[in-house]
Image (tube, rainbow, N blue to C red):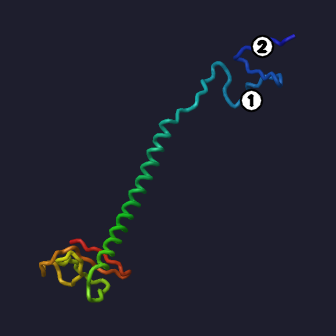
């Protein structure tokens, strides 16, 4: 003899043979609110945008540092590759020019005191790095 099937709105556990509505972690009555999963699409999108913005900001900062290091490297290659017949003094300002053949040379003579092809003004730092001085 089969036992009569309980209606859908009655919470009955057939394995234990008990009514278990009171111990369920969710509401089980017909008047209970509908169980839905939250829509987290907007939460994900907001956080993706924040994370992408932060990563781009860090990338831009690293790129700026890289560009500055590359400029410093190129300046040092240029000045150390130039002709000069004196020992530069740390902290002093020197001017880089190009001769008639296009070869760079370093001088203490300022651009307004000569008619040479001016390239840039540089200072030797205590780390023996050449840094360009902008006007």
In the rendered structure, the answer to whether residue 50 lies left or right of residue 128 reads right
Q: Secondary structure at mark 1?
A: helix
Q: CA distance from mark 2 to mark 1?
A: 21 Å
Q: Residue furthest bottom?
A: 86
Residue 12: image x %, image y %?
Answer: 77, 21
* Residue 81 spot, x, y in % from top left: 30, 78
Q: Quadrant of residue 100?
A: bottom left
The residue depicted at 76 percent of the width and 14 percent of the height is 6
Question: Residue 74 placed where, x, y %?
Answer: 32, 71
Contact flag, marks 2 and 1 (Cβ < 8 Å): no
Check the picture and name the quadrant holding the N terminus: top right
Residue occupying the point 36% across, 82% down:
126
Q: As displayed, is residue 17 above or below residue 81?
A: above
**Which quadrant does the C terminus fall into?**
bottom left
Q: Residue at x 63, y 23 (%)?
A: 32
- Horizontal side of 59 relative to 92 (left or right) equals right
Label 2, residues with CA under 10 Å away: few <14, some 14-19, many ≥20 = few
Q: Quadrant of residue 77?
A: bottom left
Q: Secondary structure at mark 2?
A: loop
Residue located farthest toward the front when viewing the structure as drawn: 101
Left or right for 9, reference 39? right
Please name the residue shown 25% across and 81% down the image.
Answer: 93
- The answer to which image quadrant residue 7 occupies is top right
The residue wearing badge 2 is 5
Closest to the observer, 131 or 22: 131
Residue under numbered circle 1: 23
Q: Is residue 71 above or below residue 90?
A: above
Q: Residues within 10 Å of mark 1 (few under 14, many from 20)?
A: few
Label annotation for residue 116: none
If you read the primary sequence from the N terminus, does the residue marked by circle 2 or circle 1 appear first? 2
Q: Nearer the viewer, residue 107 or 24?
A: 107
Q: Position of residue 64 (x, y in %)?
A: 36, 61
């Amino acid at each position: 003899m089969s036992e009569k099937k309980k209606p859908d709105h009655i919470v009955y556990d057939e394995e234990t043979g008990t009514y278990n509505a009171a111990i369920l972690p969710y509401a089980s009555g017909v008047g209970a609110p509908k169980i839905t999963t939250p829509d987290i699409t907007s939460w994900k999108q907001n956080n993706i945008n924040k994370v992408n913005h932060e990563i781009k900001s860090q990338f831009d900062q690293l790129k700026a540092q890289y560009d500055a290091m590359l400029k410093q490297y190129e300046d040092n290659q240029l000045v150390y590759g130039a002709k000069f017949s004196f020992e530069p003094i740390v902290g002093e300002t020197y001017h880089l020019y190009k001769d008639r053949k296009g070869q760079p040379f370093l001088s203490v003579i300022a651009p307004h005191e000569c008619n040479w092809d001016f390239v840039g003004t540089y200072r030797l730092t205590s780390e023996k790095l050449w840094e360009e001085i902008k006007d």
